[in-house]
Image: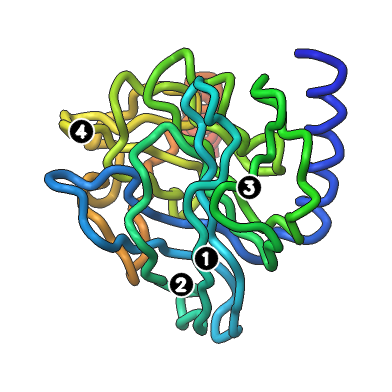
Amino acid sequence: MTTLRCAVLGTAALVFSQTAAAVSINEFQPNPVGADPAEVQVELLGNAFDSFTGVLLSIESDGSSAAGTVDRVSQVSGTFDANGLLVVTVPDLENPSFTLVLLDTFSGDVGTVIDTDNDGIADDLSTFGTVFDAIGIPDAVSDEAFVYGEQLGGQDFAFTGDEPQLVFRDSATLEWFAINDPAGTDAFDINGNAVPFANFNADPSVTTFGAVNPAAAVPVPAAAWLMVSALGFLGFGARRKV
């Protein structure tokens, strides 16, 4: 990682951590199954009953001369429900690879370029207000170098082996998971590791806009399980001696 990229990541992460923890992107469909729809839904996560106004934008992340170009901009607003969820509707997103960004304000427009020399580093954020969240979705290994989520204080998926049709945050841990098209039997975590559908408390391949997302069971580490078993055995032995 270059010194410049480290500096960009460090500065963006600091701004993000200080200002953006209360609102995040929670679920959306990078490329819904079938023909591209006119509109798609994006679920946001925030504080219950708070009102919200912001901007969702998509940044081209294909490794081409267009990388770093803003290609979708939508004003969004509403009130978070009792579960802290707000579902907004925006025009269809261009299929991945792209980076979806949630901000309070954006003074640019479609065609604004944040990566002026097309090297995968966002070097002009003068049109950005406060970044609440950002998530990069690559559809090829080569595009991992052109997603901008981490640089903006959010995260970037590793290539999951196909184009994700759905991504969502685990309702318990807030970790990201992706469902590919075709869905298969595994979800993929942010690092591209496969997680069987059976590990979740509900089918993760089904959209849950406006409802609580599925959660993956957290396995007990082997060392911890052995310790618990040993303590149980010692306790049993102590009871036998009394």
Residue type of the residue flagged with mark 4 = Asp
Give left or right: position of 151 versus 111. right
Q: Which residue is mark 1?
A: 45
Query: Do residues under tags 3 and 2 come within 8 Å of each other at their CB atoms?
Result: no
Q: Nearer the viewer, residue 242 or 169?
A: 169
Q: Earlier in the sequence, mark 4 or mark 2?
A: 2
Q: At 37% across and 50% down in the image, what residue appears?
A: 93
* Label 2 environment density (alpha carbons within 10 Å; few <14, some 14–19, many ≥20): many
State which quarter of the image contains the N terminus: top right
Q: Secondary structure at mark 4?
A: loop
* Residue 208 at x, y percent in the picture: 28, 61
Q: Whole-Å distance between the Cαs marked 3 and 1? A: 27 Å
Q: Position of residue 137 (x, y in %)?
A: 45, 34
Residue that badge 4 annotates: 181
Indicate which disc, 3 or 2, sits on the residue closer to the N terminus.
2
- Residue shown at 79% from the left, 42% from the top: 12
Residue at x-position 37% and y-position 42%: 216
Tell me the element at label 1. strand
Residue identifier under label 3: 112
Q: Nearer the viewer, mark 4 or mark 2?
A: 4
Q: Label 2 sits on what residue type?
A: Leu
Q: Name the residue type under label 1.
A: Leu
- Verify CB contact (< 8 Å) between mark 2 and mark 1: yes
The answer to whether residue 225 is seen in the rendering is: no
Disc 4 from disc 2: Cα separation: 26 Å
Crowd tier of the residue under label 4, counting other residues whose Cα lies within 10 Å: few below 14, some 14–19, many 20 or above: some
Query: From what the image shows, is residue 237 above or below residue 90?
Result: above
